[in-house]
Amino acid sequence: MLPVPSCFRLVCGALLALAGACPPAWAQPAAPGTGSIFTCIDSRGQRLTSDRPIIECLDREQKELKKDGTVRRTIGPSLTAQERAIAEERERKVADERQRQTDERRAQKALLARYPNQAAHDGERVKALRAAQDVIAAGQRRVAELEEQRRKLEQETEFYKDPARWPARLKRLIEENEQQIAAQQRFVAAQEEEKRRIDAQFDEELARLKALWAQLGPSTATSGAGGASGAPQRR
């Protein structure tokens, strides 16, 4: 046997030492986890467990267990962008409906506080319609004043047989009077429409209140009814 050079023996020794100190990756122990255990039922109906979220169950629910076996949390399936958008829209609608119900309860509470019975509601209707009618009456009086001014202007035109010979001042006053009458008539018509809207709003409120009063007791809705005398007749 040929003698082995000393340098070769040193290299071989180093390689053997490294082989003993660094085992292959498949032989290395798993890195310590957080102590959680993940479990799920896969698409084949088999129960899988792991120390980390299970890839085979990304499309289904899996549970994260504590060391004592109790559930720490439930992980829902991973969603696509479209599925996530649908879920978010569904959650938004649920939140909107919950807020709507909260607002409705708050509005009902305020309505009952303002109108504890029908007498209070009828009295408020009388005042609101009377105020609207006062505005209409003021507008109608203004129309009458403008029409009286128009009659005086027409009397002044009688001095001129030919309208082409009317003075510029008279023409301007007649034109302005016509515009003011038209504007005032539009105003009165708008106020009459507003009065009808107010009356309809009270009708709607009364229908809601009757249902709420019925929940409080049969005597609430009729308590004091008729006390608001002098209510204007609806037109």
Image (cartoon, grey):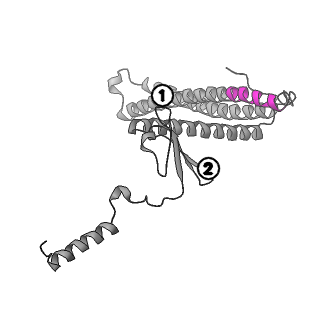
Boundaries of the magenta span = 202-217
Residue 112 in the magenta stretch? The answer is: no
Residue 209 in the magenta stretch? The answer is: yes
Q: Nearer the viewer, residue 20 or 137?
A: 20
Question: Mark 1 falls on what kind of element?
Answer: helix
- Residue carrying label 2: 69
Mark 2: amino acid: Gly
Task: Give the residue furthest to the front.
Answer: 1
Residue 190 x/y as whole percent: 55, 29
Q: Residue at x 39, y 60 (%)?
A: 28
Horizontally, residue 177 falls left or right of residue 206, namely left
Residue 115 x/y as whole percent: 77, 36
Q: Please rate how many residues cluster around mark 1, counting C-alpha atoms within 10 Å: few if below 14, some from 14 to 19, many from 20.
A: few
Q: Please rate how many residues cluster around mark 2, counting C-alpha atoms within 10 Å: few if below 14, some from 14 to 19, many from 20.
A: few
On screen, 36 above or below 189?
Answer: below
On residue 9, which mark appears?
A: none
On screen, 19 above or below 221?
Answer: below
Q: Nearer the viewer, residue 7 or 211?
A: 7
- Residue carrying label 1: 182
Question: Mark 2 falls on what kind of element?
Answer: loop
Give the quarter of the image for residue 210.
top right
Q: Quadrant of the C terminus?
A: top right
Q: Quadrant of the N terminus?
A: bottom left
Mark 1: amino acid: Ala
Task: Give the residue furthest to the bottom.
Answer: 6
Give the quarter of the image for residue 196.
top right
Report the number of numbered marks: 2
Q: Nearer the viewer, residue 20 or 110?
A: 20
- N-terminal of the pair, mark 2 or mark 1, is 2
Residue 86 x/y as whole percent: 45, 35
